[in-house]
Image (cartoon, rainbow, N blue to C red):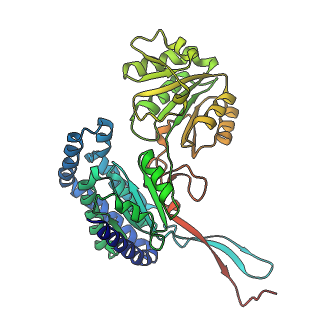
Amino acid sequence: MNALNVTEYTHTLGLQAKTASALMARAPAAIKNKALKALARLLRESTAALQIDNARDLERARAAGLAEPMVDRLQLSPKVLETCAQGCEQLAAMPDVIGEIMGMKQQPSGIRVGQMRVPIGVFGMIYESRPNVTIEAASLSIKSGNACILRGGSEAIESNKALARLVQQALAEAGLPQDAVQLVQTTDREAVGQLIAMPQYVDVIIPRGGKGLIERISRDAKVPVIKHLDGNCHTYVDDPCDIAMAVKVADNAKTSKYSPCNASEGLLVARGVAAEFLPQIGAIYAAKGVEMRGCPESLALLQSVQGAQLVAATEQDWSEEYLAPIISVKVVADVDEAIAHINRYSSHHTDAILTTNHLHAQRFLREVDSASVMVNASTRFADGFEFGLGAEIGISTDKFHARGPVGLEGLTSLKYVVLGEGEVRV
């Protein structure tokens, strides 16, 4: 497509989405749920066919020399597709929040004032790698009564096209407008530039991908953006703690998967438990090939671990999102130093404390300035599906409107509603 055609194309998508959004906003809950259940069924029925399309993307990615963790993100395995189908069903089973009125209060004038939850309208989603995001975004859009325009990465174009066809088939089955979910069919980068600069059609943009993509969107967008830039998450092992539990959780938080933004990149250990804890977790990391970039005190305690890959940490390591088998390790004096370190170096995504001290846990929850804060649980739980949101459109580290995993309510807005019986202002 030439530049003029891309402009015309994206504006057509915008107009179609705006038109569809008005129909979606008034669609009954039963009809939206019918579409979601149809989509779950179609995903299961089409698993084999979807893997053929997905294989084309995987083959092209490997031929282009894409790193294996990135290739892993492209996989549409039966397990991934089943999780998508379950997410659709979980959303269908959830109450419909659209039209809900809350906080209705009688005023001295006689009027009653409250707030109603309404769809945002049209959101644009720009994402890289993971084709399952197509289903997550589409299903949340349907349930929340919005329309959306989806622009996946060129590396997953065949998978995304196949999934988008199923979404439109499910919408049609339920009697909803197919244009309620549209996938940008061109890989031309100019389409992104157009999509983020159409406030007449698009109400919010949600970028999901690498730091470069999100920085570009944040800089150039002419519509509001829901975003997070980094996933530099921390696990803090407190004194006192259950050492066996701490080892299990710290292992999972780092090694269950290296590529997600909720994997722990920093391990902080209280000095009082470091001599007991670090050799145990160090042995597990060494066995799994995880490089440990430590402060001098932690390296001294890890020195005896057989096969450990030990590197002296630099200042940069405390802020780094590795997305790889690498973790920074620091011994801290206590919970105060852990909180101060996290608030300085973390990306305010997800941080966890492993402790048996209730007061330390409460302080950590109150004082750590992150979108998700956890006690005695793996940071890998920071996910819309795991939080019971049905699916997740992304993670927001912003403080306005939506924060943390953005699910159904994050795609809605509130408007004031006033009920009267002929009152006039005096």
Q: Quick one: quadrant of the N terminus?
A: bottom left
Is residue 393 visible in the rendered structure shown here? no
The front one of 250 and 399 is 399
Hey, which residue is sitting farthest front in the picture?
A: 3
Residue appearing at x 29%, y 70% in the figure? 5
In the rendered view, tell whether residue 257 sits above or below residue 283.
Answer: below
Hey, which residue is sitting farthest bottom in the picture?
A: 422
Is residue 135 visible in the rendered structure shown here? yes
The front one of 266 and 64 is 64
Q: From the top left corner, tell me how far across and down residue 201 is, in percent.
A: 44, 72
In the rendered view, tell whether residue 313 sits above or below residue 426.
Answer: above
Residue appearing at x 20%, y 40% in the figure? 63
Residue appearing at x 39%, y 13% in the figure? 307
Hey, which residue is sitting farthest top in the picture?
A: 304
Residue appearing at x 56%, y 52% in the figure? 403
Say left or right for 333 vs 16: right
Say left or right for 230 vs 176: right
Q: From the top left corner, tell me how far across and down residue 365 is, in percent.
A: 64, 40
Q: From the top left corner, tell me how far across and down residue 209 is, in percent.
A: 41, 48
Q: Quick one: quadrant of the C terminus?
A: bottom right
